[in-house]
Image (cartoon, helix red, strand yellow):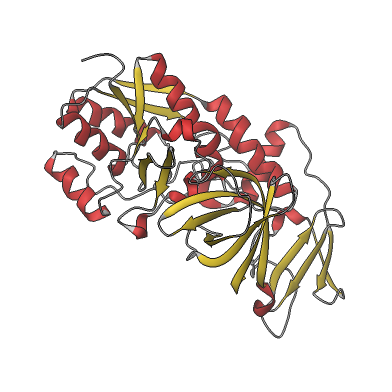
Amino acid sequence: MPQQDIIAVAMSGGVDSSTVAAMLAHSGEPVVGLTLQLWDQTRLAGKHGIPEAPKAGRCCSLDDVYDARRVSEHLGIPYYVVNQQERFEQDVVRPFVDEYLAGRTPIPCSLCNNHLKFDQLLNTARSIGASRIATGHYAVNEYDPDRKRWILKRPADLAKDQTYFLFGLTQAQLAHTLFPLGHLTKTETCEIARQHGLALAEKPDSQEICFIPGGDYKQFLTAYLEEQGRPMPETAGELVSSSGAVIGKHEGISNFTVGQRKGLGIASPSPLYVLGIDPASHRVTVGADAELATRTLRAGKLNWISIAELTGPMRVRIKIRHRHEPALATLEPAGPSSAEVVATFDEPQRAVTPGQSAVFYDGDEVVGGGWII
């Protein structure tokens, strides 16, 4: 079979990507397994309370590399580990740190997919003679000849929908990407894994951010900045009510995210939540849960998938967090350049958070998305 028909499978060591490799290999496709090594799991261990031993349930661990290699040997396919630690730190870790220090709440999985995984996987795939990549994401990717565009859609198993993290994929990337699990449920995927004799059919999904040991981002920020020889910025300031009254002090805006309730450092007869963070004045505004609701958002750094650009108002559903149910809204260009958009929700939404992704849907189709400002 010609070299250009080779498919490179992005193997994370989990059941989903392993099942993809098994499905393609057993269908007769020429398959190569690729794993991107992104982060040294022992780095920063023991500093500022970070666990010495890597915790189970984190993606991209050494155990995951071992599992991916074992699956490849079982399937009889070539397997390669590609070191991308330097690029990962540049494109994902440092922006994550800088966003938190600026009072925003980043989403590293989207950064990783948009700026590293698909880009570097395709480059590596081409270098070994493969023209396509396949991943274990739950999403559907189809070409629409009428629109002459690749269309990204929500999968059959909406509980596993990962399109929120894939909104930044370009037409060129989608044209060379396969999502074989898009029409399957998680239960069906695990059953296929068992049928192919994959030992990790019962392996649980990873839950934590791969470079945040123990899940405590504050510990990570302190340890990482110390390692880099960077001082923690002085962003201590005032805690204020929604009316502007000063009700307390805080030690730094990186300790907060919109919607946060615990760890505010002040006593109150009723629960208080972070309503907003002002990086210029270092003020953190707190208030009642009801005050978190808003009907508008603004987003920039846009990527369009089902359309070439937004030229006028469009009715969509918008997802503002991974577990958020997409909400009806009207999406409009924020100005003549269309570099940003403004959305007005039909119903107020809770905790619209700067730094997070806003992904726009038309039915099951991903229209596009951007980063909340």
- Determine whether, in the image, residue 183 is placed left or right of residue 316: left
Q: Quadrant of residue 62?
A: top left
Q: Is residue 312 left or right of residue 154?
A: right
Q: Position of residue 329 (x, y in %)?
A: 57, 66
14 or 113, which is in the foreground? 113
The answer to which quarter of the image holds residue 132 is: top left
70 to 6, vertically: above or below? below
Residue drawn at (51%, 41%) of the image: 52
Front-lying residue, 70 or 309: 309
**Residue ID at (24%, 27%):** 72
Give the left or right position of residue 298, taking residue 83 as reference.
right
Quadrant into which the N terminus falls: top left
Q: Total label count?
A: 0
Q: Position of residue 301 (x, y in %)?
A: 65, 43
**Which residue is depicted at the point 56% across and 49% down?**
369
Residue 38 visible in the current orientation: no
- Image position of 333 (left or right of 303): right
Residue 262: x, y in percent?
64, 69
Is residue 156 at least partly visible in the picture? yes
Residue situated furthest front in the rendering: 146
Residue 120 x/y as whole percent: 48, 26
